[in-house]
Image (cartoon, rainbow, N blue to C red):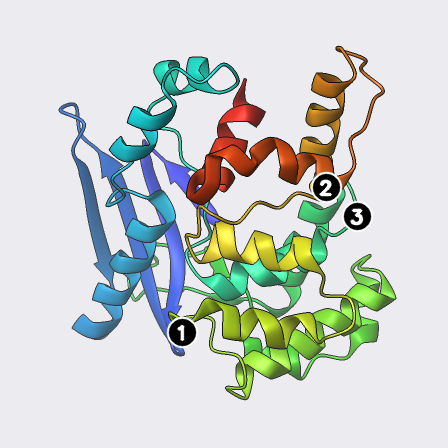
């Protein structure tokens, strides 16, 4: 999906069905340079815009840093890593699809499933000069909407999650859910009506695919364990309840998702 070669990040994206190869490099003066190859200017501009979103280069985090630089829980992380951002996917559908794959299983197993999905169904870039060959993007919503759940199960995706992924893809492909609509809550309500789509999946979409720092994936296993240790006096086996995670991060308000990223980085 994302490839690093000689210090340059490469990512294949799509504007509709038009492929866009985006390259990103950081200079010695800490400038970030973006370039894109596509058949049209519109597609190239889209690819750059989506990678700028994924890397968070246009975000102003100064209000967050001012508010919480002295915070007893995350202040040390903010002072050491003021550049830290919550990881993002370039496209919200990618964040949603992979959140479904990652439900209730360890990340390594989920990542293996995602690689199989991309290898079997994903879109690839083949430039005229071979540049960027081997890069793949995840399959479109339309492709996943027409995929048999049994095929997804053959990639080690559980049956319920395979069906949820296909149903979500159908909603997106048919335009019933617009993940780019600024009224995010409207799409979330429709997604939550799909069996197998709960609060954690929608919050992962919101934080990692729509840039919503106020959304906290409180059911995340890492957060449940981390908060459990805090509340349990350092007990490595303690595990919090989801409501306890939400309560701990409530003081961070509109920044709760980003605060959680700093907490996990400690």
**Residue 95: % across, % down:** 54, 57
Graded by Cα atoms within 10 Å as few (under 14), some (14 to 19) or many (20 or more), the crowding at tag 2 reads: few
Query: Contact (CB < 8 A) between labels 1 and 2?
Result: no
Q: Quadrant of residue 26?
A: top left
| Residue drawn at (63%, 83%) of the image | 170
Foreground disc of the pair 3, 1: 1
Q: Quadrant of residue 108?
A: top right
For label 2, the SS is helix
| Residue drawn at (35%, 58%) of the image | 130
- Residue beneath disc 1: 181
Indicate which disc, 2 or 3, sits on the residue closer to the N terminus.
3
**Residue 149: % across, % down:** 79, 75
Q: CA distance from mark 2 to mark 3?
A: 18 Å
- Residue beneath disc 2: 243
Q: Is residue 254 left or right of residue 101?
A: left
Q: Foreground residue, 250 or 195?
A: 250
Disc ID at residue 104? 3
């Amino acid at each position: 999906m994302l490839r690093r070669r000689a210090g340059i990040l490469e990512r294949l994206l799509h504007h509709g069905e038009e492929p866009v190869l985006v390259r990103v490099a950081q200079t010695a003066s800490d400038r970030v340079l973006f370039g894109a190859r596509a058949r049209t200017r519109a597609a190239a501009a889209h690819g750059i815009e989506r990678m700028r979103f994924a890397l968070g280069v246009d975000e102003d985090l100064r209000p967050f840093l001012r508010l919480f630089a002295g915070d007893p829980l995350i202040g040390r992380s903010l002072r050491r890593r003021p550049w830290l951002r919550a990881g993002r996917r370039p496209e919200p559908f990618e964040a949603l699809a992979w959140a479904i794959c990652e439900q209730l299983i360890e990340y390594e197993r989920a990542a293996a499933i995602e690689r199989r999905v991309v290898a079997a169904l994903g879109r690839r870039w083949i430039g005229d000069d071979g540049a960027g060959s081997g890069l793949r993007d995840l399959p479109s919503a339309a492709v996943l909407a027409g995929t048999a759940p049994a095929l997804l199960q053959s990639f080690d995706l559980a049956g319920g999650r395979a069906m949820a992924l296909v149903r979500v893809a159908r909603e997106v492909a048919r335009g019933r859910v617009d993940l780019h609509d600024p009224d995010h809550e409207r799409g979330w309500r429709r997604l939550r009506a799909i069996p197998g789509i709960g609060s954690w999946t929608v919050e992962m979409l919101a934080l990692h695919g729509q840039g919503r720092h106020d959304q906290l994936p409180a059911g995340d296993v890492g957060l449940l364990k981390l908060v459990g240790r805090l509340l349990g006096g350092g007990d490595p086996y303690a595990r919090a309840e989801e409501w306890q995670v939400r309560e701990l991060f409530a003081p961070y308000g509109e920044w709760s998702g980003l605060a959680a990223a700093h907490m996990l980085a400690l």
